[in-house]
Amino acid sequence: MNTNKPSPSDAPPPPWWQVGMVWLVLGGPAAVVVAGIVTAVIAVRGAEPVLTSQESAKFSDRPAVQGRNHAAAAQPGQ
């Protein structure tokens, strides 16, 4: 038996970037970080201006409440 023949366990391991499991482990958290950054950019670019107390006094819940109550009321003739 020839003992000088190298066995598969004697081969040097591949570099870390060529191992598929490494990309599987690093890919999940990397995707979450990218998704968080994209979400933050969308939120900042699409942010509506903040209303002051004088501007917010113009808007009331009253029309919404009236509309909701009107929609819930029984319609005559039905």
Image (cartoon, rainbow, N blue to C red):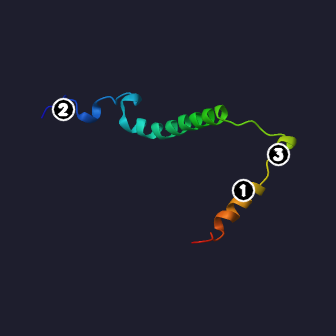
Q: Earlier in the sequence, mark 1 or mark 3?
A: 3
Label 1, secondary structure: give it: helix
Residue 52 in the image, given as x and y percentages of width and height: 84, 40
Question: Dividing the image into 4 quarters, which one contains the N terminus?
Answer: top left
Question: Dividing the image into 4 quarters, which one contains the C terminus?
Answer: bottom right
Q: In the rendered structure, which amino acid carries the disc numbered 3?
A: Lys
Judged by depth in the image, the label closer to the viewer, 1 or 2, is 1
Q: Quadrant for residue 76, please give it.
A: bottom right
* Left or right relative to 59: residue 17: left
* Left or right relative to 30: residue 59: right
What numbered label is drawn on residue 3? 2
| Circle 2 crowding by C-alpha within 10 Å: few under 14, some 14–19, many from 20 | few
| Circle 1 crowding by C-alpha within 10 Å: few under 14, some 14–19, many from 20 | few
Q: Is residue 67 above or below residue 72?
A: above
Residue 75 in the image, given as x and y percentages of width and height: 62, 69
Q: In the rendered structure, which amino acid carries the disc numbered 2?
A: Thr
Judged by depth in the image, the label closer to the viewer, 3 or 2, is 3
Q: Earlier in the sequence, mark 1 or mark 2?
A: 2
Q: Earlier in the sequence, mark 3 or mark 2?
A: 2
What numbered label is drawn on residue 64? 1
Give how far apart the Cα atoms at labels 3 and 2 are. Answer: 91 Å
The residue under label 3 is: 58
Label 3, secondary structure: give it: helix
* Left or right relative to 23: residue 7: left
Q: Is residue 11 above or below residue 36?
A: above
Give how far apart the Cα atoms at labels 1 and 3 are. Answer: 14 Å
Q: Residue at x 19, y 28 (%)?
A: 4
In contact (CB < 8 Å): disc 1 and disc 3:
no
Q: Quadrant for residue 44, please give it.
A: top right
